[in-house]
Image (tube, coloured by chain):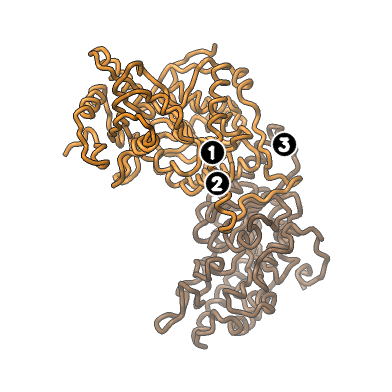
Amino acid sequence: MKNLGIYAARLTPPVEGFAPGHRACIGCGEALAVRLACKAAGENIIIANATGCMEVVSSQLPASAWRIPWIHTLFENTAAVASGVEAALKAMTRKGKIADRGTKVIAMAGDGGTSDIGLQALSGALERYHDFLYICFDNEAYMNTGIQRSSATPFGASTTTSPAGKKSIGQKTWKKNMPAIAVAHNIPYVATASPSYPFDMMDKVKKGLAVNGPAYVHILSVCPTGWRSTPDLSVRLGRLAVETGVFPLYEVEDGKYKLSMDVSPLRPLKDYMSIQGRFRHLSEGMVKKIEDRVRKDYEQLKERCA
Amino acid sequence: MGKKVGMEVSLAIAEAAKMADTDVVAAYPITPQTHIVERLAELVANGELDAEYIPVESEHSAMSACLGSVATGARTFTATAGQGLELMHEVLYVAASMRLPVIMVVANRALSSPLNVWGDQSDLMAVRDTGWIQLICENGQEAYDTTLYAFRIGEDKRVLLPVMVHVDGFYLTHVIEPIEIPEQEKVNKFLPPFKYPLPLDPDKPVSMGAFAPPILYSETKKAQEVNLRASLPVIREVWDEFEKVFGRKYKAVESYRTEGAKTLLLTLGSFGETAMAAVDKLRDEGQAVGLLKLRLWRPFPFEDLRKAVGDAELLIVIDRALSYGGPGGPAFSEIRSALYSEKKRPRILGFVGGLGGRDLMVAEFEGMVKRAQEMRPKGAEEEFEMYGVRE
């Protein structure tokens, strides 16, 4: 085993920045990911959160699940808000207005808030090289508003705005490669992660916070509500996404790709798709077509990591 | 006494933000605001202002970065114009609702389409309901002073609201005027350091921007409304304090030669300077005409307006913005509404003019007075006209 950290059990820090009592659905992979990310980040952080599931489930007035400083303003601007927080910390520390405590900034958003409506603000913040970590919690559609397709929805998935029907196979486009877009900004750290591999994910959050400059971590967050899967399968689905090659785990440090774990030979894609209602309508032939593409992409990634 | 120097108004505005020891500037360039932010970038580059300048990729992000910055406790400044202000629109509401005192200069500009980079106040009126304090400047000195005291108003613990300082694009931003720049010690005496009561701080975690269900939303809006109205006495207090330190007196409604005036013109912004010349001329001709200049747009100064209107018989409101298909220019419509319940009120007529950088000269202000005296409207929709438009 090349990367022991992925498998070896360790204790997670007891600190809970994202406290229990929030209103996420049963089996929400995203809430699990946020909780683990907060554990990894510790208490000396400030979070800027985009509008979306995590904001809504965590902050209904007069309650809050956040035990760390947290700000939500709008949907598409979280990277810009984080820019402002980072710049303010920098300026005020330099001018002696606040003590230098090395406080870190995290911006977090869903796949819609990242790869669609928030892409411009994210690109701007990465390019300006703010010292912050951006985490995309990707559940592959606009789940908060009722499962509408985003540019991160996988090919063939049926959503409320890409419904499968007599003349449609569901989502007709391939998932936007957000990590590659982040890499194209020449930032020091980009990674993909999954809460189904908690220690690997937490290490990546820590690494992203430790680098000097912007970091981007893309976390696949299983959504039983939107994926039409049973809540008890969320952790399993996260693992299957990795094992089938749908969502490979890798890092890109200073432009250099590194596979976090090589899962080849890949499991058959149907192992992953058959337990999700959103792919239920796909024919065997269509699943095969998608599998071919997944395998091609995986091989390309492996070449990049070589 | 500070020294009076010939200075482009945009540079004076940047100077005010510098002398306020701004910590963060987040801005996106747009004509006619550019000279303000270029100068600020230069001041930061030269080390004359110790601040972080965030060259954001859009105005939406400019205002969003300002939210993050103020929430962290930093004194924060930005500037924009026209389309830029419109792109910020939804973010403006958030700044006010979350009580984040961003200070912003707006170089007022027409709105597309057709594309027009020149001055009018369509942008100012379009953001009327965002919950900001809106101050309107008439000349360069006012632009410097207002930028400076906007920090004091917005950051006051009793206020904690964002403040927009309106300067007419080109008419003010690009002209060179004699402006008195005070000594830094005086500014320091007038403007205390910014202390945001509950900033984002890991030692004292707060959640900002929670969402409100119907059972709470109305209460948050009522609180905001009460808060904005309650800023008026604080604004007056800051004006008094400003006069004590710098010797210049500001009021919500400025009166010019209104003694015994039967007809009053009312303007917002740089129109005031031209209108004064027109009033002088009409007075010389023996006409009892005076001028009111509205400096405070939000919170609306009802009491000051009533007092200033006094016993006038005809009030002519001149708007530099249009409310399509509505009851006249926005200022006209609001002023008519503000005076509606008065037992004795003047006849109120409105003109919309000077859109998209169209000059209105002294003769045109005289013309509007003449036209208003002739107008015999049959209904509310005839109580205003667009002035100086070719048919």
Rendered hue of chain B is orange
Label 2 to label 3: alpha-carbon separation:
34 Å
At label 1, the amino acid type is: Leu
Q: Give the image location of residue A216, x and y in percent.
A: 62, 57
Q: Which chain is brown in the rendering?
A: A
Q: Give the residue pinned by disc 3.
A: A98
Instruction: Give the SS element for disc 1.
Output: helix
Identify which residue is drawn at 66% across, 62% down. A251
Question: Few, some or many C-alpha atoms within 10 Å of disc 1 (few <14, some 14-19, many ≥20)?
Answer: many
**Residue B20 found in image quarter:** top right
Between circles 3 and 1, the one closer to the viewer is 1
Q: What residue is shown at x 63% (from left), y 58% (from top)?
A: A60
Depth order, front residue of A290/A223:
A223
B218 or B146, nearer to the observer: B218
**Res. B191 image quadrant:** top right
Q: Please tell me which of labels 1 and 2 falls first in the chain.
A: 2
- In space, the residues marked 1 and 2 are separated at their CA atoms by 10 Å
| Three-letter amino acid code at the position of disc 2 | Lys
**Foreground: B135 or A120?**
B135
Circle 1 marks a residue in which chain?
B
SS label for mark 2: helix
Query: Which residue in the structure is indicated by mark 2?
Result: B222
**How far from the left and from the top, in percent, is residue A195?**
70, 68
Closer to viewer: mark 1 or mark 2: 2
Q: CA distance from mark 3 to mark 1?
A: 30 Å
Q: Which mark is residue B228?
A: 1
Q: Is residue A287 above or below residue A6?
A: below
